[in-house]
Image (cartoon, rainbow, N blue to C red):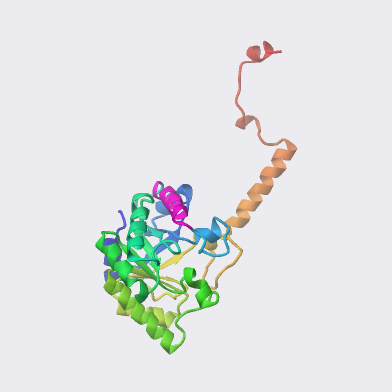
């Protein structure tokens, strides 16, 4: 069954946990979709795990559209959410609506995600009014990493916790259908989840959220530049890949590959006429 913003809300109301993973290409998206996941996020994390940037700030609209469209071609059942990259919505409400529209039309998204609380509520409201579903993102918002002074847990003080709760209520009122909570203490994330009528998706926010999201390269052990505390490794695919690469090198160098079963044949009489 196709996952939609409606089925997300129904899951919240039924107390059913939602699952989300990132994807950035056709073949990976197809595998994730076939596994039965609820949602795929084409995150601006592609800047780190695909493009090799140190942060997400350098990611462009063209990057998001290119990778989003590739993922869209590989899925049937997931709710496909595409991140709005840095400075694609902060500059003005007009820019936010235009760029969200591009992610829907050219990237083939089902919804868009943007970072921030009260300060981006005008953008959220305008995008939603244009008929585009919006997922909010609070807590550790990577596009603001320079303002935070690094990757730090958010909402630990009374003042910061109060602001997060107020921001969560604000983005819901502005029309967001869900909100990602990143690097937030479990007790605060659980409280926000209880306070909101829309689903919360946690990443480093404990199991009190309505759902969870992870970067697939992190959970498969394919990206080792930096591994956050909240990541659980479900498989060491990176090691399996490296072993396969080494075996390939070994067989090519020894002549074992390609073998007869990998080769095409032709009539000996034809080849003899060529000498």
Using the rendered view, name the quadrant where residue 190 is placed. Answer: bottom left
Relative horizontal placement of residue 104, taking residue 60 as reference (left or right) = left
Does the rendering let one see residue 258? Answer: yes
Residue 177 seen in render: no
Question: Is 67 within the magenta?
Answer: yes
Residue farthest right in this picture: 254
The x and y percentages for residue 149 are 54, 77
Residue 192 percent across, percent down from the top left: 35, 79
41 w.r.t. 249: above or below: below
Q: Report the predominant secondary structure element of the magenta stretch.
A: helix
The answer to if 178 sits in the magenta stretch is no
Magenta span covers which residues? 60-73
Q: Quadrant of residue 228?
A: bottom right
Which residue occupies 57% across, 56% down? 237
Quarter of the image for residue 166 reads: bottom left
Position of 4 with respect to 140 (left or right) is left
The picture places residue 29, in percent across and down from the top left corner, at 44, 51
Q: Where is the C terminus found, in terms of image quarters?
A: top right
């Amino acid at each position: 069954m196709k996952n939609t913003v409606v089925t997300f809300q129904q899951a919240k109301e039924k107390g059913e946990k939602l699952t989300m993973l990132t994807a950035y290409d056709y073949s990976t998206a197809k595998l994730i979709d076939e596994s039965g996941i609820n949602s795929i996020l084409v995150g601006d994390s592609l800047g780190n795990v695909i493009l090799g940037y140190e942060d997400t700030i350098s990611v462009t609209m063209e990057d998001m559209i290119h990778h989003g469209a590739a993922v869209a071609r590989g899925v049937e059942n997931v709710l496909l959410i595409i991140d709005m990259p840095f400075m694609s919505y902060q500059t003005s409400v007009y820019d936010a609506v235009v760029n969200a529209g591009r992610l829907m039309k050219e990237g083939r998204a089902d919804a868009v995600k943007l970072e921030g609380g009260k300060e981006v509520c005008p953008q959220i409201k305008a995008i939603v009014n244009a008929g585009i579903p919006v997922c909010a993102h609070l807590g550790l918002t990577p596009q603001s990493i320079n303002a935070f002074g690094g990757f730090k847990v958010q909402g630990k003080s009374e003042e910061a916790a109060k602001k997060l709760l107020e921001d969560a209520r604000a983005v819901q009122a502005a029309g967001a259908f869900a909100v990602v909570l990143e690097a937030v203490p479990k007790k605060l994330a659980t409280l926000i989840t209880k306070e909101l009528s829309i689903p919360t998706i946690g990443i480093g926010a404990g199991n009190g959220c309505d759902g969870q999201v992870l970067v697939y390269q992190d959970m498969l052990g394919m990206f080792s530049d930096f591994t956050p505390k909240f990541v659980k490794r479900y498989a060491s695919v990176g090691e399996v890949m490296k072993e396969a690469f080494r075996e390939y090198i070994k067989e090519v160098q020894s002549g074992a590959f390609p073998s007869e079963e990998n080769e095409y044949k032709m009539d000996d009489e034809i080849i003899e006429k060529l000498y």
